[in-house]
Structures are given as structure tokens and as C-alpha cells.
């Protein structure tokens, strides 16, 4: 198991460009979904925010869109996207196979799978509206629910839940199980993002 700080240090010091790590993460999410489901023509919603977690979601959208019907609900502002997340948003922005939707245009009951790429390991403290209401509504959806790296609203180091938290059926986490996922181990799959297992923090 690994803490969020150890994970950041690994990413900073492993010698692999951050963009490559994000690509590996998003592709890994797509690969796991293919192994678990027949995703052909499935309706998949990816809910993404500003950070690297959202970037992983954008990459996953690109890797899934040839087989499934992909909608992306980006709930942030484009000007707040940074580095890899911005680059990967630009890659899907004009992709005819991916619809980028506004919150008002989404009916969560339309989807077979909902992917939570809202908050990653950087989440701390209370989640405010409109995100709090959004997560509550996502939890009510009948779709199979997947979290990228860690469920939004769950502290990656302690497992403590914020005022609201996403309730996934499956967690696809990067490199190693985060300490806060101790109680979620039975529904967590680890994706290799290219960092050696014996890499030193």
C-alpha cells in the first residue's frame, strides 16, 4: 500500500514524463473495462474535473470511443485545466465520437457505466455544491459505477469520507493500492502505469 505523498514522489522521480503516466493510466482504465464488460455500444458517461484525475478520464474516453458510446461531463472551467489534463481535453474536444455535455444536458439514467474522474488523491475537506449534489445524484443512478484511482470524496490516506462521496462498484487505482482503500480492497483493481514496483520514493 502507498500514501498519496509517496505516490506523488514516485511520479516526480521515476523518470517517466507525467504525460506518459496519464496516458498509461487512462488506457489502463479502458483496458480493465474491456476485460470486465462487453463494452460494444454501451453508453458510458465519464464525469471529470480539473485535475490529473480528470485527465485520466479524458484519456480513457479516447481509448473507449471506438467501441462504446462515450459522453464526457466536464464540470469545470477549461481555463482551470493544467498541463496533461488540458492537453488531453484538447484531444477529445473535437472528436466526433465523444460528446462533451453540460450538466443540464445529462440524464444519468441513460448510461450503462458511469466513470468518476472528479477528484483524485488531492481531495481534502468538504465538497461544496454543485459538486456535492452531483455526486449524490450519481450515486442514485442505476449504472455500474467506476472510480478512477480513488472514489471522489474519500481521503486517499485515511479512507475517511467527506460530506459526500462517490459509491463505486469498482475502483481502478494506479500503481498500488492507496492506504485509504483498505476497506475497498475487494472492489479495487490495480493498473500498471509504467512505474517500477521497486522504485524508491
Image (tube, grey):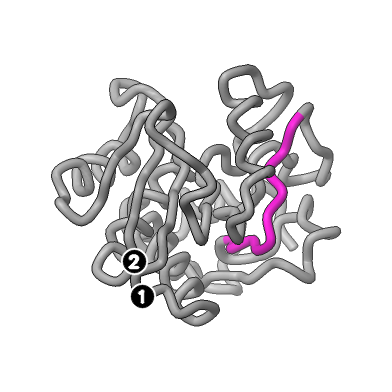
Q: Relative to the observer, which residue lies in front, 124 or 100?
A: 100
User: Which mark identifies residue 177?
Assistant: none
Q: CA distance from mark 2 to mark 1?
A: 5 Å
Residue 171 position within the rendered picture, expressed as x and y whole percent measured from the top left: 64, 61
Residue 15 appears in the figure: no
Residue 18 position within the rendered picture, expressed as x and y whole percent measured from the top left: 37, 51
Q: Which of the marked residues, 2 or 1, is nearer the chain's N terminus? A: 1
Q: Quadrant of the C terminus?
A: bottom right
Residue hosting label 1: 40
User: For the point 38% across and 66% down, which residue is it?
Assistant: 27
Q: Relative to the observer, which residue lies in front, 200 or 128?
A: 128
Asked if the residues shown at circle 2 and circle 1 are in contact, with their CB atoms under 8 angstroms apart, the answer is yes
SS type, badge 2:
loop
Residue range in magenta is: 164-173
How crowded is the residue under tag 2: few (<14 C-alpha within 10 Å), some, or many (20+)? some
Say whether residue 94 is left or right of residue 9.
left
Q: Relative to the observer, which residue lies in front, 19 or 42?
A: 42
User: For the point 68% across and 43% down, which residue is it?
Assistant: 140
Residue 56 appears in the figure: yes
User: For the point 30% across and 71% down, which residue is it?
Assistant: 67
Q: Is residue 108 above or below residue 115?
A: above
Q: Quadrant of the N terminus?
A: bottom right
Q: Quadrant of residue 23?
A: bottom left
SS type, badge 1:
loop
Residue 113 position within the rendered picture, expressed as x and y whole percent measured from the top left: 52, 59
Residue hosting label 2: 68
Q: Relative to the observer, which residue lies in front, 8 or 85?
A: 85
User: For the point 68% across and 44% down, which residue is it?
Assistant: 139
How crowded is the residue under tag 1: few (<14 C-alpha within 10 Å), some, or many (20+)? few
Amino acid at each position: 500500500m502507498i500514501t498519496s505523498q509517496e505516490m506523488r514522489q514516485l511520479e516526480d522521480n521515476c523518470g517517466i514524463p507525467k504525460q506518459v503516466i496519464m496516458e498509461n493510466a487512462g488506457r489502463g482504465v479502458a483496458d480493465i473495462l474491456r476485460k470486465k464488460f462487453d463494452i460494444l455500444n454501451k453508453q458510458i458517461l465519464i464525469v471529470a474535473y480539473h485535475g490529473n484525475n480528470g485527465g485520466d478520464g479524458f484519456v480513457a474516453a479516447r481509448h473507449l470511443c471506438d467501441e462504446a458510446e462515450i459522453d464526457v461531463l466536464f464540470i469545470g472551467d477549461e481555463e482551470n485545466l493544467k498541463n496533461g489534463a488540458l492537453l488531453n481535453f484538447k484531444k477529445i474536444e473535437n472528436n466526433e465520437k465523444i460528446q462533451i455535455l453540460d450538466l443540464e444536458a445529462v440524464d444519468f439514467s441513460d448510461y450503462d457505466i458511469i466513470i468518476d474522474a472528479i477528484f483524485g488523491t488531492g481531495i481534502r475537506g468538504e465538497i461544496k455544491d454543485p459538486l456535492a449534489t452531483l455526486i449524490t445524484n450519481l450515486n442514485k443512478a442505476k449504472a455500474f459505477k467506476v472510480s478512477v484511482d480513488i472514489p471522489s470524496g474519500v481521503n486517499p490516506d485515511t479512507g475517511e469520507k467527506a460530506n459526500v462521496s462517490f459509491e463505486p462498484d469498482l475502483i481502478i487505482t494506479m500503481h498500488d493500492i492507496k492506504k485509504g482503500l483498505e476497506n475497498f480492497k475487494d472492489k479495487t483493481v490495480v493498473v500498471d502505469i509504467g512505474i517500477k514496483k521497486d522504485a524508491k520514493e
